[in-house]
Amino acid sequence: PPPPREDPPATTGGIGARFVSMAEVTVSKIFPAGFGWQSSSIVAEGMGFEADTLNFALTTGFGDFLGVLSGHTGYYALKKAVTGSDDINIAQEAQTGFLLASAAFCSGAGWQPIVNVLQGMNLPFTGVFAGTWVGCGSLFYLGLRAGRTIYSGPMQYIEEPTYENSKSDASLSVAIGGATAFFVGTDAAYLPEQNFLINVVGIADGTPDLTGCAIAGSSTALGFATCQTGFNLIFPAGKCWND
Protein backbone atom coordinates (compact mmCIF):
# COMPACT_ATOMS: atom_id res chain seq x y z
CA PRO A 1 0.00 0.00 0.00
CA PRO A 2 1.47 1.48 -1.16
CA PRO A 3 3.27 4.52 -1.95
CA PRO A 4 6.21 7.59 -4.36
CA ARG A 5 7.88 10.74 -5.63
CA GLU A 6 8.20 13.01 -8.59
CA ASP A 7 9.91 16.05 -7.10
CA PRO A 8 13.64 16.70 -7.67
CA PRO A 9 16.19 15.24 -5.26
CA ALA A 10 17.52 17.35 -2.41
CA THR A 11 20.99 17.40 -3.92
CA THR A 12 22.16 17.05 -7.48
CA GLY A 13 24.42 14.56 -9.14
CA GLY A 14 25.78 11.17 -8.30
CA ILE A 15 24.71 8.13 -6.35
CA GLY A 16 24.74 10.13 -3.13
CA ALA A 17 21.90 12.31 -4.40
CA ARG A 18 19.89 9.21 -5.25
CA PHE A 19 20.18 7.93 -1.70
CA VAL A 20 19.22 11.32 -0.27
CA SER A 21 16.07 11.45 -2.38
CA MET A 22 15.34 7.79 -1.56
CA ALA A 23 15.50 8.59 2.15
CA GLU A 24 13.20 11.59 1.72
CA VAL A 25 10.66 9.54 -0.21
CA THR A 26 10.77 6.73 2.32
CA VAL A 27 10.14 9.06 5.24
CA SER A 28 7.60 11.36 3.59
CA LYS A 29 5.54 8.89 1.56
CA ILE A 30 6.39 5.20 1.80
CA PHE A 31 6.18 4.83 5.58
CA PRO A 32 3.02 7.01 5.76
CA ALA A 33 1.46 4.91 2.98
CA GLY A 34 1.85 1.66 4.90
CA PHE A 35 0.81 3.32 8.15
CA GLY A 36 -2.25 4.82 6.47
CA TRP A 37 -3.29 1.54 4.86
CA GLN A 38 -3.06 -0.38 8.11
CA SER A 39 -4.89 2.36 10.03
CA SER A 40 -7.73 2.42 7.53
CA SER A 41 -7.98 -1.38 7.60
CA ILE A 42 -8.66 -1.12 11.33
CA VAL A 43 -11.36 1.47 10.61
CA ALA A 44 -12.83 -0.74 7.88
CA GLU A 45 -12.98 -3.75 10.19
CA GLY A 46 -14.59 -1.60 12.87
CA MET A 47 -17.27 -0.63 10.36
CA GLY A 48 -17.96 -4.29 9.66
CA PHE A 49 -16.29 -4.46 6.24
CA GLU A 50 -14.88 -7.89 5.50
CA ALA A 51 -11.47 -8.13 3.83
CA ASP A 52 -13.00 -9.53 0.63
CA THR A 53 -15.42 -6.64 0.06
CA LEU A 54 -15.25 -3.60 -2.19
CA ASN A 55 -15.84 -1.32 0.79
CA PHE A 56 -12.74 -2.70 2.50
CA ALA A 57 -10.63 -2.20 -0.64
CA LEU A 58 -11.84 1.38 -1.14
CA THR A 59 -11.35 2.26 2.52
CA THR A 60 -7.79 0.99 2.59
CA GLY A 61 -7.06 2.67 -0.73
CA PHE A 62 -8.26 5.95 0.74
CA GLY A 63 -6.05 5.38 3.79
CA ASP A 64 -3.10 4.94 1.45
CA PHE A 65 -4.10 8.13 -0.38
CA LEU A 66 -4.28 10.14 2.83
CA GLY A 67 -0.96 8.77 4.09
CA VAL A 68 0.89 9.78 0.93
CA LEU A 69 -0.81 13.16 0.51
CA SER A 70 -0.38 14.25 4.13
CA GLY A 71 3.12 12.80 4.38
CA HIS A 72 4.36 14.47 1.22
CA THR A 73 2.84 17.92 1.76
CA GLY A 74 3.58 17.90 5.48
CA TYR A 75 7.21 16.96 4.94
CA TYR A 76 7.87 19.71 2.42
CA ALA A 77 5.95 22.32 4.40
CA LEU A 78 8.09 21.46 7.43
CA LYS A 79 11.27 21.42 5.36
CA LYS A 80 10.49 24.86 3.94
CA ALA A 81 9.69 26.22 7.40
CA VAL A 82 12.96 24.89 8.82
CA THR A 83 15.27 25.72 5.93
CA GLY A 84 13.50 28.78 4.50
CA SER A 85 14.38 27.47 1.06
CA ASP A 86 12.90 29.36 -1.87
CA ASP A 87 13.36 26.23 -3.98
CA ILE A 88 10.40 24.56 -2.26
CA ASN A 89 7.12 25.59 -3.88
CA ILE A 90 4.30 24.45 -1.61
CA ALA A 91 1.67 24.70 -4.35
CA GLN A 92 3.82 22.50 -6.59
CA GLU A 93 4.43 20.00 -3.80
CA ALA A 94 0.70 19.85 -3.03
CA GLN A 95 -0.07 19.01 -6.67
CA THR A 96 2.74 16.45 -6.84
CA GLY A 97 1.50 14.93 -3.60
CA PHE A 98 -2.02 14.68 -5.01
CA LEU A 99 -0.76 12.89 -8.12
CA LEU A 100 1.30 10.41 -6.11
CA ALA A 101 -1.52 9.90 -3.61
CA SER A 102 -3.93 9.14 -6.44
CA ALA A 103 -1.59 6.46 -7.75
CA ALA A 104 -1.20 5.13 -4.21
CA PHE A 105 -4.99 4.86 -3.94
CA CYS A 106 -4.94 2.51 -6.93
CA SER A 107 -2.22 0.24 -5.56
CA GLY A 108 -3.58 0.45 -2.02
CA ALA A 109 -7.13 -0.44 -3.04
CA GLY A 110 -5.83 -3.30 -5.13
CA TRP A 111 -3.52 -4.80 -2.51
CA GLN A 112 -6.04 -6.84 -0.51
CA PRO A 113 -7.98 -8.19 -3.54
CA ILE A 114 -4.71 -9.22 -5.19
CA VAL A 115 -3.46 -10.94 -2.04
CA ASN A 116 -6.84 -12.63 -1.57
CA VAL A 117 -6.73 -14.07 -5.09
CA LEU A 118 -3.13 -15.24 -4.84
CA GLN A 119 -3.60 -16.80 -1.41
CA GLY A 120 -6.84 -18.37 -2.62
CA MET A 121 -4.78 -20.13 -5.30
CA ASN A 122 -2.70 -21.65 -2.48
CA LEU A 123 0.48 -20.19 -3.90
CA PRO A 124 3.66 -20.38 -1.83
CA PHE A 125 4.58 -17.24 0.05
CA THR A 126 7.09 -16.26 -2.63
CA GLY A 127 4.35 -16.55 -5.26
CA VAL A 128 2.07 -14.20 -3.35
CA PHE A 129 5.04 -11.90 -2.73
CA ALA A 130 5.98 -11.74 -6.43
CA GLY A 131 2.40 -11.51 -7.68
CA THR A 132 1.64 -8.62 -5.35
CA TRP A 133 4.81 -6.84 -6.48
CA VAL A 134 3.75 -7.07 -10.12
CA GLY A 135 0.06 -6.41 -9.54
CA CYS A 136 0.32 -3.42 -7.22
CA GLY A 137 3.28 -1.97 -9.09
CA SER A 138 1.22 -2.10 -12.28
CA LEU A 139 -1.76 -0.44 -10.59
CA PHE A 140 0.47 2.34 -9.28
CA TYR A 141 1.87 2.90 -12.76
CA LEU A 142 -1.60 3.03 -14.30
CA GLY A 143 -2.66 5.45 -11.58
CA LEU A 144 0.29 7.73 -12.36
CA ARG A 145 -0.42 7.73 -16.09
CA ALA A 146 -4.13 8.34 -15.61
CA GLY A 147 -3.37 11.06 -13.07
CA ARG A 148 -1.06 12.83 -15.49
CA THR A 149 -3.74 12.67 -18.18
CA ILE A 150 -6.46 14.06 -15.91
CA TYR A 151 -4.54 16.50 -13.73
CA SER A 152 -2.12 18.04 -16.25
CA GLY A 153 -4.92 20.28 -17.52
CA PRO A 154 -6.12 21.93 -14.30
CA MET A 155 -2.86 21.54 -12.35
CA GLN A 156 -0.02 23.63 -13.74
CA TYR A 157 2.77 21.67 -12.05
CA ILE A 158 1.70 18.22 -13.27
CA GLU A 159 3.44 17.21 -16.48
CA GLU A 160 1.29 15.57 -19.12
CA PRO A 161 2.08 11.97 -20.11
CA THR A 162 5.17 11.74 -22.30
CA TYR A 163 7.50 8.97 -23.38
CA GLU A 164 10.24 10.36 -21.14
CA ASN A 165 8.15 10.50 -17.97
CA SER A 166 6.69 7.08 -18.78
CA LYS A 167 10.16 5.63 -18.19
CA SER A 168 10.63 7.39 -14.85
CA ASP A 169 7.08 6.50 -13.82
CA ALA A 170 7.81 2.86 -14.65
CA SER A 171 10.99 2.62 -12.57
CA LEU A 172 9.27 4.34 -9.64
CA SER A 173 6.33 1.95 -9.94
CA VAL A 174 8.62 -1.08 -9.76
CA ALA A 175 10.06 0.26 -6.49
CA ILE A 176 6.55 0.90 -5.17
CA GLY A 177 5.70 -2.67 -6.11
CA GLY A 178 8.56 -3.76 -3.88
CA ALA A 179 7.02 -1.85 -1.00
CA THR A 180 3.68 -3.60 -1.48
CA ALA A 181 5.38 -7.00 -1.74
CA PHE A 182 7.19 -6.58 1.56
CA PHE A 183 3.84 -5.57 3.06
CA VAL A 184 2.70 -9.14 2.39
CA GLY A 185 5.18 -10.14 5.07
CA THR A 186 3.01 -8.51 7.72
CA ASP A 187 0.48 -11.35 7.33
CA ALA A 188 1.78 -13.70 9.99
CA ALA A 189 -1.05 -16.20 9.44
CA TYR A 190 -0.36 -17.25 5.82
CA LEU A 191 2.29 -19.98 5.54
CA PRO A 192 4.36 -18.58 8.41
CA GLU A 193 7.06 -21.20 7.87
CA GLN A 194 7.66 -19.76 4.37
CA ASN A 195 7.37 -16.10 5.29
CA PHE A 196 10.99 -14.95 5.32
CA LEU A 197 9.88 -11.54 6.59
CA ILE A 198 7.76 -12.74 9.53
CA ASN A 199 10.43 -12.08 12.16
CA VAL A 200 11.05 -8.62 10.76
CA VAL A 201 7.61 -7.22 9.91
CA GLY A 202 5.09 -9.90 10.87
CA ILE A 203 1.99 -8.58 12.66
CA ALA A 204 0.74 -11.34 14.95
CA ASP A 205 -2.72 -11.55 16.49
CA GLY A 206 -2.88 -9.42 19.60
CA THR A 207 -0.42 -6.80 18.35
CA PRO A 208 -1.58 -3.35 19.57
CA ASP A 209 -3.15 -1.31 16.77
CA LEU A 210 -0.63 1.52 16.84
CA THR A 211 2.27 -0.90 16.91
CA GLY A 212 0.76 -2.77 13.98
CA CYS A 213 0.48 0.45 11.99
CA ALA A 214 4.10 1.30 12.70
CA ILE A 215 5.19 -2.20 11.63
CA ALA A 216 3.13 -1.85 8.45
CA GLY A 217 4.83 1.43 7.62
CA SER A 218 8.20 -0.13 8.34
CA SER A 219 7.45 -3.02 5.98
CA THR A 220 6.68 -0.76 3.04
CA ALA A 221 9.69 1.40 3.84
CA LEU A 222 11.94 -1.67 3.91
CA GLY A 223 10.59 -3.00 0.62
CA PHE A 224 10.93 0.30 -1.18
CA ALA A 225 14.41 0.97 0.19
CA THR A 226 15.60 -2.53 -0.73
CA CYS A 227 14.44 -2.25 -4.33
CA GLN A 228 15.48 1.36 -4.76
CA THR A 229 18.95 0.70 -3.38
CA GLY A 230 19.45 -1.74 -6.23
CA PHE A 231 18.21 0.85 -8.72
CA ASN A 232 20.50 3.51 -7.26
CA LEU A 233 23.52 1.27 -7.78
CA ILE A 234 22.60 -0.22 -11.16
CA PHE A 235 20.91 2.49 -13.25
CA PRO A 236 23.21 4.66 -15.39
CA ALA A 237 23.36 8.36 -14.55
CA GLY A 238 20.25 10.24 -15.64
CA LYS A 239 18.23 7.07 -16.24
CA CYS A 240 16.50 6.50 -12.90
CA TRP A 241 13.31 8.24 -11.77
CA ASN A 242 15.13 10.07 -8.95
CA ASP A 243 17.88 11.63 -11.12
Image (cartoon, rainbow, N blue to C red):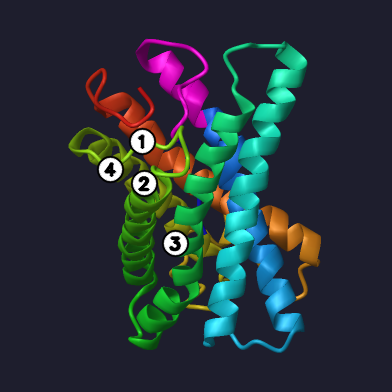
* Residue named by callout 4: 161
Looking at the rendered structure, the kind of residue marked 2 is Arg
Quarter placement of the C terminus: top left
> Which span of residues is magenta-colored?
6-22
Kind of residue indicated by mark 1: Glu
Label 4 to label 2, Cα distance in Å?
A: 6 Å
**Depth check: 174 or 92 in front?**
92
The answer to whether residue 221 is left or right of residue 148 is right
Q: Earlier in the sequence, mark 2 or mark 3?
A: 3
Front residue of 190/86: it is 86
The answer to whether 236 is drawn above or below residue 51 in the figure is above
> Dot 4, how many residues are within 10 Å of its Cα: few (below 14), some (14-19), or many (20+)?
some
Measure the alpha-carbon separation of dots 3 and 1: 21 Å
Q: What percent of the width, then of the height, locates residue 151?
A: 43, 47
**What is the number of the mark on residue 148?**
2
Q: Of callouts 3 and 1, which one flags the residue occurring earlier in the amino acid sequence?
A: 3
Instruction: Sort mark 3 into few (<14), some (14-19) or many (20+) by Cα contacts within 10 Å.
Output: many
Dot 1: element: loop
Residue at coordinates 50% horizontally, 63% vertically from top-left?
A: 108
Q: Secondary structure at mark 2?
A: helix
- Measured in 3D between alpha carbons, the distance from the residue under mark 2 to the one under mark 1, in whole angstroms, is 6 Å
**From mark 4 to mark 3, how far is it between C-alphas?**
19 Å
Q: Which residue is mark 1?
A: 159
Residue 131's tag is none
Of marks 3 and 1, the one in the foreground = 1
Give the Cα distance between marks 2 and 3.
16 Å
**Numbered label attached to residue 107:** 3
As for residue 18 lying within the magenta part, the answer is yes
Asked whether 139 falls inside the magenta stretch, the response is no
Are dots 1 and 4 in contact, CB under 8 Å?
Answer: yes
